[in-house]
Image (spheres, grey):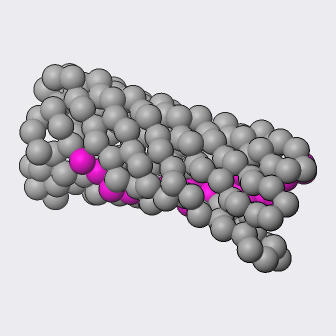
Amino acid sequence: MKSIKAVLALAGFSAALAFAGPAAAQSDSSFYIGGTVGEANLKDACSGVDGCDKTDAAWRILGGYQFNRYFAVELGYHDLGKASAPLGDTKAKAWEAVGIASYPLTNEFSVYGKLGAYNGKLEGPTGDETTNDVTYGAGVRYDFTKHIGVRGEWQRYHDMGGNNVVKTDVDVVSIGVVYRFQ
């Protein structure tokens, strides 16, 4: 089932690239870099454990290419923090490749959705587990200038973990800055 989800995510990512290709000739295209900070929630990491804290600070570095006002692709690394329990911590991190579809409401303000795949790792007191699965999210972006924008978003990493550690969805709420090279 995981491989089907990953194939569907990559197919959606490829479709976004195919539709964005002809529009890349517009002047809104550019490479960009950025970073975010926020809070991650390892939703099921504390199931039945007293004294466990399943939320922690999270941060991400990212880079991408904006084809036009509507489509972008992005690569990123996300440190998803840890769930702290009396018997040991469970740490999470992920690499991701996502396609982003934006809808501008004004020249400066946009809403967007993202869909892609991730390679994540949970490190727990009982072992480590690497997972490949789907990530998706939604957010808003405000562009202060043609180079600098701020965005706030929610993103989910679906079904991290499994055999050696707990299986959990990881939700992240974050705010970040993006710098476009134009």
Which residue is located at x 80 percent, y 55 percent?
A: 88
Across and down, in percent, residue 31 comes to 29, 24
Q: In this image, 104 relative to 2: left or right? A: left
**Residue at screen point 24% across, 48% down:** 150
Residue drawn at x 24%, y 32% as measured from the top left: 179
Which residue is outermost to the front?
86
Quadrant that contains the C terminus? top left
Report the number of discs: 0
Magenta-colored segment: predominant secondary structure: strand
Residue 55, given in percent of the width and then of the height, sits at 59, 63
What percent of the width, then of the height, locates residue 36?
39, 45
User: Who's the residue at 21% across and 43% down the image?
Assistant: 149
Residue 81 lies, with reference to residue 154, above or below; the image says above
Q: Nearer the viewer, residue 166 or 18?
A: 166
Say if 102 sits above or below 16 in the image.
below
**Residue bounds of the magenta highlight:** 150-171
In the rendered structure, the answer to whether residue 85 lies left or right of residue 11 reads right
Based on the displayed image, in which of its 4 quarters is residue 45 positioned?
Answer: bottom right
**Of 11 and 57, which appears nearest the observer?**
57
Was residue 161 drawn as part of the magenta stretch in this picture? yes
The answer, for residue 142, to whether it is visible in the render is yes
Where is residue 147? Give x, y as percent.
Answer: 15, 32
Instruction: Kindly tell me whether residue 131 is visible in this rendering.
Output: no
In this image, 2 relative to 170: left or right? right
Q: Image height check: is 25 above or below 90?
A: above
Q: Is residue 11 magenta?
A: no
